[in-house]
Amino acid sequence: MYLIVGLGNPEDEYSKTRHNMGFNTINKLAEKYNIEVKQKKFQALFGSGIINGEKVILLKPQTYMNLSGNSVKEVIDFFKIDLKNLIIIYDDMDIEPGKIKVRKKGSAGGHNGIKSIIQQLGTEEFGRIRIGIGRPEHKGDEINYVIGAIPEEDNIKLKEGIEKARDAVIELLKNGIDSSMNKFN
């Protein structure tokens, strides 16, 4: 069983922000594979189904970004999920919009959601798909950039990144993380 987690913030005001790229990718996967992500448990919304012959849980923590690890840990402990079957999808300012990076492990790189997950799990050894959102024009404006409204012209590239992240998950489930890294990095 795979646990595929999209990071984001739960309230409607954040739904169309750069910080919700993970949630948006989960929504795309759920739509493509008819998986309802509506069950409320583990401080999250989740649903389960089959993608490429693999049983998956799609998870959207409802804890706010900085506490995402609390929800992820609850699900891993409850379902006894092997960390090699954990995939976290999230936004990354160090990658240009429209691009993604697939990795087997790594540091938090300043991302508070990943920091929380690493802290709760006690390891950096889990897969991740980072969706590029680029950097704000002015240094020091990072918070407004990630949780503020997205100008329409930026939306096109961000949607490309979400679709690539969805496809990277599908490839990973079909042929493994190395194949997904080779195809999408």
Image: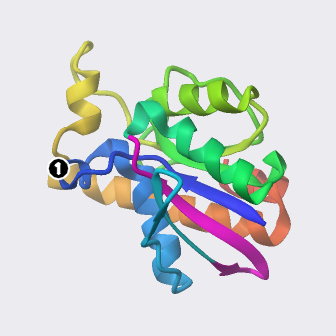
Q: Quadrant of residue 53?
A: bottom right
* Residue 17 seen by the camera: yes
The residue shown at (51%, 86%) is 34
Q: Which residues are magenta?
A: 49-63
Q: Position of residue 105 (x, y in %)?
A: 75, 34
Specify the principal SS of the magenta part.
Answer: strand
* Left or right of residue 89, residue 82 in this image: right
Q: Position of residue 23 (x, y in %)?
A: 42, 56
* Left or right of residue 103, residue 19 in this image: left
Q: Position of residue 176 (x, y in %)?
A: 83, 61
The image quadrant where one finds the N terminus is bottom right
Q: Is residue 138 above or below residue 155?
A: above
Tell me the residue that label 1 is attached to.
13
The residue shown at (65%, 42%) is 73
Residue 55 is covered by the magenta coloring: yes
Q: Inspect the image, locate mark 1, and give the three-letter code of the amino acid beneath it.
A: Glu
Where disc 1 sits, the SS reads: helix
Residue 166 is covered by the magenta coloring: no
Question: Alpha-carbon neighbours of circle 1 within 10 Å: few (<14), some, or many (≥20)?
Answer: few
